[in-house]
Amino acid sequence: MAEHLVKFDTSAAPVSVPSGTLITEAAVQAGVDINQPCGGQGRCGRCAVQINAGNVRRRSVLRLSQTDIKSGYALACQSVVEGDVEISVPPQEKIERRLTTDRVVAEVRAPHGYNPTLAQTITRIPLSITPPDIDDQSDDWSRVQTVLRQQAGLNEVVVSIETLRTIGNALRAGDWQVTAVVDNVTWDCPGCPARLIDLIPGHIPADEPLWGVAIDIGTTTVSLLLVDLLTGEVRAQVAEYNGQIARGEDVISRIIYAAKDGGSRHLQQMVLETIEELIDRASKRIKIKPTDISKATISGNSTMIHLLLGIPAESIRLTPFVTAVNHVPSLTAAEVGIGIHPNGTVDCLPGVASYVGADITAGVLSSGLDDTKSLTLFMDVGTNGETVLGSQEWLVTCACSAGPAFEGAGVMHGMRATKGAIEEVWINGYTLEPTYRVIGGGKPRGVCGSGLISLLAEMFMTGVVDKAGRLNLSSESERIRGGSHGREYVVAWGTETQDGKDIVITHVDIDNLLRAKAAIYAGFSVLAKSVGVPLESVEQVLIGGSFGKYINVEKAIQIGLLPDMPWDKYKFLGNTSVLGAYYGLLGKDMRNRISEIAQKMTYIELSADNTFYDAFMSAMFLPHTDLTNFPTVAGALPATSPDRRKEG
Ligand code: FES
């Protein structure tokens, strides 16, 4: 096959690739980073590059305008090289950290009466070993085993080859006084032997901290708590965007990218790098070495856990939607590639199904849902709306694909909740002029998820859009107009924005938002119906997930994303997944509870439920086809509202 030279303006030397190679593949070979927010499906249009010279064949130009194509733009994930080419790569979207990003949880405390001696599986045991002599030539490892049996009652202890390589030196460096770090229980095998993690020269003082980390791998953000296992105290908390974002903004895009040649390995490396950076940052903050950490407990949705472990995730998105594994056996850090002590334990919390993962079982634990008598709805609002309904007696769960609209993807001027994002909007009911608040202040760049909810609610309540989400073109406001992508509302004029272009919300964006909110509403209403529980009898609604923190309840009810209930029933809990990982890290009782939650939850597959489609279609309106479900919204609509008039 003919070879062609591809030269990127951001790399020094051209690379030679066979004819028909995708530009994204050539970029990888050249070491050039091109973001692929939809995982290379040709849906997002954000991998566009400019062809300065030479030939490429565009397989798809979706999301490119005729002007873009005339100017030489091509989608890097959809265009193949058919001759020598020179390519300009526009500046890649910088993934900035949210201002308060290192604060993962507001407050976290060990459970009342936490006793590491009883609860903790990781223990540190001082050992005094009898040195060998000419009359006692038994080997080093046998001596350690004997003393662990005699002094700690551990009848059987296994050791890895890496630790075996170090014990001889440790024994002699400590003059036969050593400290053994042992993991005494694994969740997949309760009666199995204990495992020696490390043998450290000398006796470490009993009150010296013993370190562990609780990690939540979110599709967007990875959060980590560094914990002293002896006291349960969180000594550092750090968070960073998941490095995989550049290869897909939602789980489906990541799964599709992972299925490409080398994609799975690439995504695994990306998340491991993010975790390594977080471990480094947290360790430096309290002046320890990453290898001082003996245990990591990991939570995350099922796709994130599969990608972390390099397990093919394709079956998660294909009928009948099954995971490769819900209960991952206990692993070592070396096996996973996580930069704590190589023999440290890595415990991935159990999930329930493809779209109800460990983040939800962890969330149920940390929210106390499995321990309450009150009928409770727990929701994690994101690209997948996961919902759990129940109490200490029973738990049912479902997940619906809301799509990434609330993450700002699939919306023309949508963006993540970073500096420059509009996060709250108010529209004057008479003039239809908006005011807005921007994260970090200054000029806006786009609108994030909470801003989109706020914007849509304000547009509905002021009559900019009707119940079906249609823009009111009969209005005299110059902000409602026909644009190059159809009808749109101008949120910010170009004179106010960072790039000088108008920030608009189009009718296609509104449709995507309606679909996202309808899927979530239909999910929990079908779930409630499946167990014969009217939504009105729900006593509390707990919202987990970092996105939940920023939702304005009033506006979320106005668009019909959340059920119309008194606001005091709502509690926003923040990152319940990392909190669940924290409790799981702390000991046997909590960790057992998470396993019990996973076993106890009954999963309802919505795609097999024939009432879901009807519920979804009914929820495709603002706030809902049936306004009687939303009495406070109906009451707040202006008397002049066409929707109000229609309702009579
Ligand atoms: S269109 Fe190429 S990555 Fe989305």
Image (tube, rainbow, N blue to C red):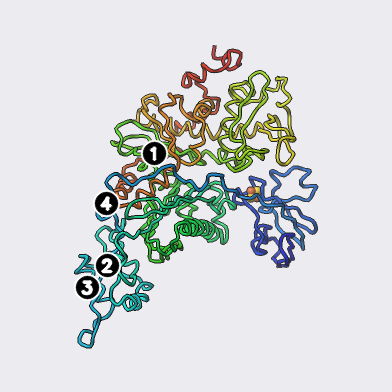
> In the image, what residue type sits under mark 3?
Thr
In the rendered view, would you say 50 is above or below 409?
Answer: below
> Residue beneath label 1, please?
397
Horizontally, is 337 left or right of 431 in the view?
A: left
Mark 1, secondary structure of its residue: strand
Of the residues tagged 4 and 1, which is closer to the observer? 4
Report the label total: 4
In the rendered view, would you say 465 is above or below 589?
Answer: above
In the rendered view, would you say 242 is above or below 7?
Answer: above
Q: In front: 104, or 353?
A: 104
Spatial CA span between label 2 and label 4: 19 Å
Mark 2, secondary structure of its residue: strand
Of the residues tagged 3 and 4, which is closer to the observer? 4
Q: In front: 376, or 116?
A: 116
Spatial CA span between label 1 and label 3: 49 Å
- Counting residues from the start of the chain, the first of labels 1 and 3 encountered is 3
Picture residue at 39% right of the left edge, 49% below the top: 581
- Counting residues from the start of the chain, the first of labels 1 and 2 encountered is 2
> Which quarter of the image is occupied by the C terminus?
top right
Spatial CA span between label 3 and label 4: 27 Å
Q: Are marks 3 and 2 in contact (CB under 8 Å)?
A: no
Of the residues tagged 1 and 3, which is closer to the observer? 3
Mark 4, secondary structure of its residue: loop
Label 1 lies in ligand 1 vicinity (Cβ under 8 Å): no
> Residue beneath label 4, please?
115
> Residue beneath label 2, please?
126
Picture residue at 69% right of the left edge, 35% below the top: 503
> Residue beneath label 3, please?
146
